[in-house]
Image (spheres, coloured by chain):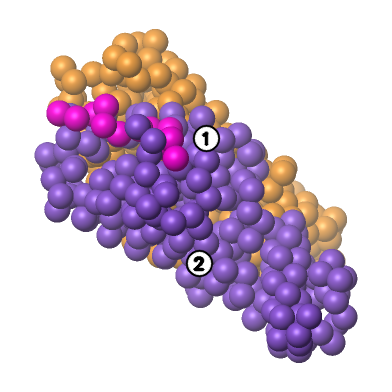
Chain colours: A orange, B purple
Amino acid sequence: MVKQERAARTRRSLIHAAAEVFAEVGFVPASLGTISTRAGVSNGALHFHFANKSMLAEAVEAQATEAVRQLAETARARHGDSLQAVVDAMHELIGSLAKDVVVRAGFELAGDIARRAQSPLRQEWQRWVEESLRRAEDAGALAAGVSWKDAARVVVAVTVGLEVLGGEDASWLSRQNVTRIWELLLPLLTDRREPEALVSSGSRSSAVVSPRVQPELAQPER
Amino acid sequence: MVKQERAARTRRSLIHAAAEVFAEVGFVPASLGTISTRAGVSNGALHFHFANKSMLAEAVEAQATEAVRQLAETARARHGDSLQAVVDAMHELIGSLAKDVVVRAGFELAGDIARRAQSPLRQEWQRWVEESLRRAEDAGALAAGVSWKDAARVVVAVTVGLEVLGGEDASWLSRQNVTRIWELLLPLLTDRREPEALVSSGSRSSAVVSPRVQPELAQPER
């Protein structure tokens, strides 16, 4: 393995180990020694890559933000300016909280009082939801009398609420729970003339297709 | 001042100072020295009342939980088994996050990874919302096809989301923001035959009446 590859692999291991430790104990009590041990690297190697704990936390947040951006853009590539893109992206986001420790740690760090001012992750999600619902409104996909701003307010608050509640009780993060919420919200947000066109549980492909798949392979099979 | 009164006052000062420090820096970095100095009492006096920082945090959470219970019960006393009780209680809860440091600190502590397992505050709110919406359903106040469980899921997730987002950006906690959310949700939850009977901004009295007022004085003036 060439030197550059090894360095990149060490960096990834450190970010993953840091995410695990941040998610388990929080930012302030997390120890660099625990993180380097868990990553299987020396303290010296850790400090070669990250000058301090804050820089490690920023790397975790950056990777989590990129993961959220990717899953959201995949949903948009699949469904365009429809509400289904928002439904699928929220399912993917909540699902990744349950299975991807980097995304989970990214959100935990966003909620950490000592660090929250700089967190990019919730802002990225809010920005994407607002833009998507504005596009949906422009495309005539929102019900009459519902503004994209109000819809975004509810979708963002619900997502952040699920994320926080899921940290205490994982059943909040279940696909079934998210589906029940969309079953309640969708009739409110959508044009009533075509409610069956939208799938509260996420379109079929969103349940099985990786966010990294090419958009042209990710069309619903119907 | 008799000894007992002085002890009670010292205890209240310590809880208030601890709430301020927990809300500012979080549980782990909070120092007992900072808390006793801010309360204007000696370290010895602090340790007479609270054996350690966890017991102080539990006292803050207990007082916050009692404040939430009181405001929720006041809303119920005023509006019975209607959705208006839930609307008003959510307005009061979000308002108290903005103005009462003990409630704010109670929710911050609930979100602290190191402590979250024992937090009673969100559970108390969830329990009250679920019970209130179950009563509203029994009283025929929920729209056909909407179950109290699903309605509670959304109301609890939105409340926790607002609380967390409000820690980063206080505009999420504004009365206007909460009102916009209810304007979107109420037509969904209520029986369409009487939508005007409910006030998204909270019934008039909820904006001006203290949660400690007697229920018989707290009737809307209409």
Residue type for callout 1: Arg
Query: Dividing the picture into quarters, in which one does residue A147 lie?
Result: top left
- Among the two numbered marks 1 and 2 on one chain, the one whose residue lies closer to the N terminus: 2
Mark 1 Cα within 10 Å, few/some/many (few <14, many 20+)? some
* Quadrant of the snapshot with the N terminus of chain B: bottom right
The location of residue A113, given as percent across then percent down, is 69, 55
* B146 in relation to B39, above or below: above
For this rendering, which residue is in front, A216 or A77? A77
Q: Which residue is mark 1?
A: B175
Query: Dividing the picture into quarters, in which one does residue A112 lie?
Result: bottom right
Dot 1: what SS? helix
- Magenta region includes residue B134: no
Residue appearing at x 21%, y 55% in the figure: B135
Residue appearing at x 37%, y 44% in the figure: B219
The answer to whether residue B50 is left or right of residue B206 is right
Residue appearing at x 60%, y 76% in the figure: B58
Disc 1 versus disc 2: distance between alpha carbons?
A: 22 Å
